[in-house]
């Protein structure tokens, strides 16, 4: 298994995996909405991979994208540093429990160390308890609550 940053050639695989995540979250929260990430994500994908403050980390197994994390660098005035934020983290259902997610977290930690990023945070839907246990197992601590404002 290898980890690397996404390129334009990974677009379809990334969008497919993000749609799997969207469908899974919607199912867990009781929404009948089906994801349309593949349809709507094209432009944002290209923006993300072309920026220097956003990255998509990939986990690759047998030349297939089996996991990913979308990572954003955010400047923080109060602490005078940049912190990371993971918006999406998914390991494909067939590959869960194989250590790939832990390897992806380690890759992100290494990236942060190399770039003097002291902390990264992520948010996770309340209903994703298995994911919460995974994050704790890999060194994450629940430190705050997140609130959403729909506009």
Image: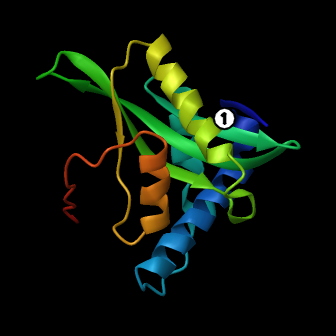
Q: Residue at x 19, y 62 (%)?
A: 149
Bin the neighbour count of mark 1 within 10 Å (Cα to Cα): few under 14, some 14-19, many 20 and up.
many
Residue 128: in sight, yes or no?
yes
Question: Which structural element holds mark 1?
Answer: loop
Q: Nearer the viewer, residue 74 or 9?
A: 74
Please name the residue that numbered disc 1 is placed on. Answer: 6
Q: Quadrant of the N terminus?
A: top right
Q: Give the x, y percent position of residue 88.
A: 48, 50
Res. 39 visible in picture: no
Report whether 13 appears left or right of 101. right
- Please state, as top left, top right, bottom left or bottom right, where the C terminus lies in the image: bottom left
Left or right: residue 112 versus residue 97 is left
Residue 101 at x, y percent in the picture: 61, 46
Q: Residue furthest front?
A: 137
**Relative to residue 143, is residue 26 depicted above or below?**
below
Quarter of the image holding residue 76?
top left
Is 113 rendered above or below residue 119?
above
Tell me if residue 30 comes above or below residue 78 in the rendering.
below
Task: Name which quarter of the figure residue 24 lies in.
Answer: bottom right
User: In the image, is residue 73 above or below residue 34?
Assistant: above
Colour scheme: rainbow
Query: Horizontally, is 15 left or right of 127 in the view?
Result: right
Horizontal placement of 68 versus 150: left or right?
A: right
Q: Residue at x 48, y 87 (%)?
A: 32
Total number of numbered labels?
Answer: 1
- x, y percent for residue 99: 68, 46
Question: Which residue occupies the extreme right position in the image?
Answer: 62
Q: Position of residue 39 (x, y in %)?
A: 61, 64
């Amino acid at each position: 298994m290898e980890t690397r940053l996404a390129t334009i050639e990974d677009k379809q695989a990334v969008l497919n995996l993000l749609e799997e995540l969207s469908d899974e979250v919607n199912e867990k929260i009781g929404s009948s909405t089906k994801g349309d990430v593949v349809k709507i994500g094209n432009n944002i994908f290209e923006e993300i991979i072309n920026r220097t403050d956003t990255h998509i980390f990939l986990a690759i197994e047998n030349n297939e994208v089996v996991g990913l994390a979308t990572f954003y660098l955010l400047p923080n005035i109060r602490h005078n540093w940049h912190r990371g934020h993971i918006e999406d983290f998914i390991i494909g259902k067939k590959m869960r429990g194989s250590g790939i997610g832990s390897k992806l977290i380690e890759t992100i930690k290494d990236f942060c160390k190399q770039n003097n990023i002291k902390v990264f945070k992520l948010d996770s839907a309340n209903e994703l308890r298995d994911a919460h246990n995974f994050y704790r197992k890999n060194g994450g601590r629940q430190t705050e609550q997140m609130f959403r404002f729909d506009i």
